[in-house]
Image (cartoon, rainbow, N blue to C red):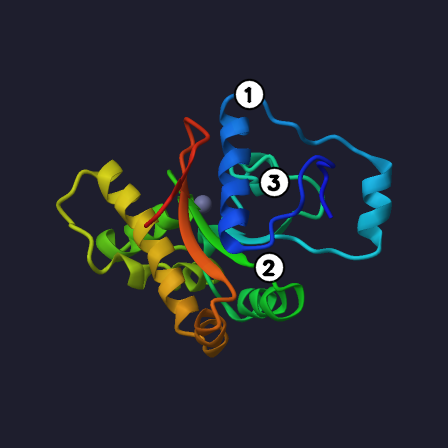
C-alpha cells in the first residue's frame, strides 16, 4: 500500500526512517509530492490501513506530520497532543498501533518554540500557573525539565527542554512491557526527533 506506485512500502523500521528522511528532504527543498488525491488509492485504503510509521507529535498548527514528511494517505499513524506528552488515551492509541497495525517505526517528535514546553518552563522555574486542565497537561512535561540549567538563556533553555521532553517520553515508552518485548524481538524501533520551525527540517535524535 503506497501513494507512490514506484515505491514499495517500507517493511522495516530502518526503511521507514529512510522514507521519512527523504520526505522531509523533499518538503524542505520545495519538492513535496502530496497532497495529490488519487481515487484508486482512496478505494484501496478503504479496505484497510498499513501505515509504516507511528508519529506522536504536538498539536501545534505549524507541525503537521504528513506535510513535514511529505507522506500520503495511509502512510502515517499520527497522534497529536500539546507538548507530545503521554497519558492514558495516548498510550492506548500507541498500544493499538503496536499490536494491531504493527508499524515498525515509532517517532516522538517535538518542535522548536513549543508553547506547551514554554509554559512548563514558566511553571517550573517562575512559578506561573495556568488554568486547571492545562496544569494537568504541564505536569506531564515538568519532570523532563529537572536537568536543565536554570541560568541558561531562555532560547537555549527552551530548545534543551524540547529535546529533554522528547527523550523523557521515549524513556517512558521504552519502560512499557510491550515495548520491552517488541524491542527484544527486534520488531520495532523508537526514535526521537525535533522539528525546526524556521527551516522545516526534522532533526532525528541519537
Ligand atoms: Zn508544541
Of tags 2 and 3, the one toward the viewer is 2
Outermost residue to the top: 30
Label 1: which residue? Answer: 30
Q: Quadrant of ligand 1?
A: top left
Give coordinates of residue 65: x percent, y percent. 56, 42
The residue located at (74%, 55%) in the rendering is 49
The reply to whether the C-beta atoms of the residues labelled 2 and 3 are less than 8 Å apart is no
Question: Pointer 3: residues within 10 angstroms few (<14), some, or many (20+)?
Answer: many
Q: Which mark is residue 66?
A: 3
Bin the neighbour count of mark 1 within 10 Å (Cα to Cα): few under 14, some 14-19, many 20 and up.
few
Secondary structure at numbered mark 2? loop
Closer to the camera: disc 2 or disc 1? 2
Question: Viewer-proximal residue, 87 or 14?
Answer: 14
Quadrant of the rendered image containing residue 203: top left
Residue 154 visible somewhere in the drawing: yes
Task: Residue 127: name its quadrant.
Answer: bottom left
Q: Which residue is mark 2?
A: 103
What percent of the width, then of the height, locates residue 183? Answer: 45, 69
Please name whichever residue, 10 or 50, is drawn nearer the observer in this view of the structure: 10
**Label 1–label 3 contact, CB within 8 A:** no
Identify the secondary structure beneath mark 3. helix
Does any portion of residue 79 appear in the rendered image?
A: no
Separation of residues labelled 2 and 1 (CA atoms): 28 Å
Between 145 and 134, which is closer to the camera in this rendering? 145
Q: Is residue 26 left or right of residue 149?
A: right
**Mark 2 CB near ligand 1 (8 Å cut):** no
Measure the C-alpha gap from mark 1 to mark 3: 15 Å
Amino acid at each position: 500500500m503506497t501513494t507512490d506506485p514506484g515505491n514499495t512500502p517500507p517493511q522495516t523500521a530502518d526503511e521507514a526512517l529512510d522514507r521519512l528522511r527523504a520526505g522531509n528532504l523533499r518538503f524542505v527543498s520545495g519538492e513535496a509530492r502530496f497532497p495529490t488525491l488519487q481515487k484508486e488509492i482512496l478505494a484501496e485504503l478503504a479496505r484497510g490501513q498499513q501505515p509504516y510509521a507511528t508519529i506522536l507529535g504536538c498539536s501545534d498548527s505549524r507541525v503537521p506530520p504528513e506535510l513535514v514528511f511529505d507522506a500520503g494517505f495511509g502512510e502515517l499513524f499520527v497522534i497529536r497532543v500539546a507538548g507530545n506528552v503521554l497519558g492514558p488515551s495516548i498510550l492506548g492509541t500507541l498500544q493499538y498501533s503496536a499490536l494491531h497495525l504493527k508499524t515498525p517505526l515509532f517517532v516522538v517528535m517535538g518542535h522548536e518554540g513549543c508553547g506547551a514546553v514554554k509554559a512548563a518552563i514558566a511553571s517550573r522555574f517562575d512559578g506561573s500557573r495556568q488554568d486547571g486542565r492545562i496544569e494537568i497537561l504541564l505536569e506531564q512535561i515538568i519532570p523532563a525539565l529537572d536537568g536543565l540549567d536554570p541560568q541558561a538563556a531562555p532560547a537555549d533553555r527552551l530548545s534543551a527542554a524540547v529535546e529533554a521532553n522528547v527523550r523523557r517520553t521515549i524513556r517512558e515508552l521504552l519502560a512499557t512491557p510491550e515495548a520491552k518485548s517488541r524491542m527484544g524481538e527486534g520488531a520495532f524501533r523508537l526514535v526521537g526527533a525535533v522539528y525546526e520551525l524556521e527551516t522545516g527540517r526534522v532533526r532525528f535524535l541519537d
